[in-house]
Amino acid sequence: MSTAEFSAESELPQALPAGEQLAAARANRGLSITEIAQHLKLSPWQVEALEAGDHRRLPSPVFVRGFIRNYARLVKLDPGDCWRAQTASHRRRRCRAARSVLRRKFPIRSRAG
């Protein structure tokens, strides 16, 4: 498989998490998860985890960043935009989790008169 096969630019909304952007770009090019995995020298389950945003199944964040960068380049997305989308998505998940913990520890009681 040559890099020329992946040369088409795509317009994807930047609000999507990185995994969804990568999956959409892959689908737009008619590529399978197996083809992406072979080109990036990853296992298909690693590509699936990247696309699902399930980074608990992947190695440390420094490797995930490299995986996202290389995948983005392969499908002709801006690697920086994908990484920024990933970190923004990660921050939102952490904030939701923190709010959930705070709500459980400090429930808001109504002030019924």
Image (cartoon, rainbow, N blue to C red):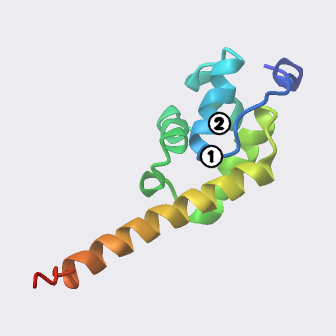
Which residue is pictured at 75% across the width and 44% down the height? 70
Mark-to-mark CA distance, 2 and 1 = 6 Å
Under mark 1, the amino acid is Ala
Q: Residues within 10 Å of mark 1 (few under 14, many from 20)?
A: many
Q: Judge by depth and name the residue closer to the eye, 68 or 108.
A: 108
Q: Is residue 38 visible?
A: no
Under mark 2, the amino acid is Leu
Q: Judge by depth and name the residue closer to the eye, 95 or 74.
A: 95
Numbered disc 1: secondary structure: helix
Which residue is pictured at 43% across the width and 52% down the height? 57
Q: Look at the numbered discs 2 and 1 and tell me whether their residues touch, using CB distance below 8 Å.
A: yes
Q: Judge by depth and name the residue closer to the eye, 84 or 95.
A: 95
Q: Which residue is mark 2?
A: 22
Left or right: residue 25 compared with residue 17: right
Q: Which residue is mark 1?
A: 18
Left or right: residue 68 compared with residue 106: right
Question: How far across and down, in percent of the image, does residue 29 sit?
Answer: 72, 18
Q: Name which quarter of the figure residue 99 lies in.
A: bottom left
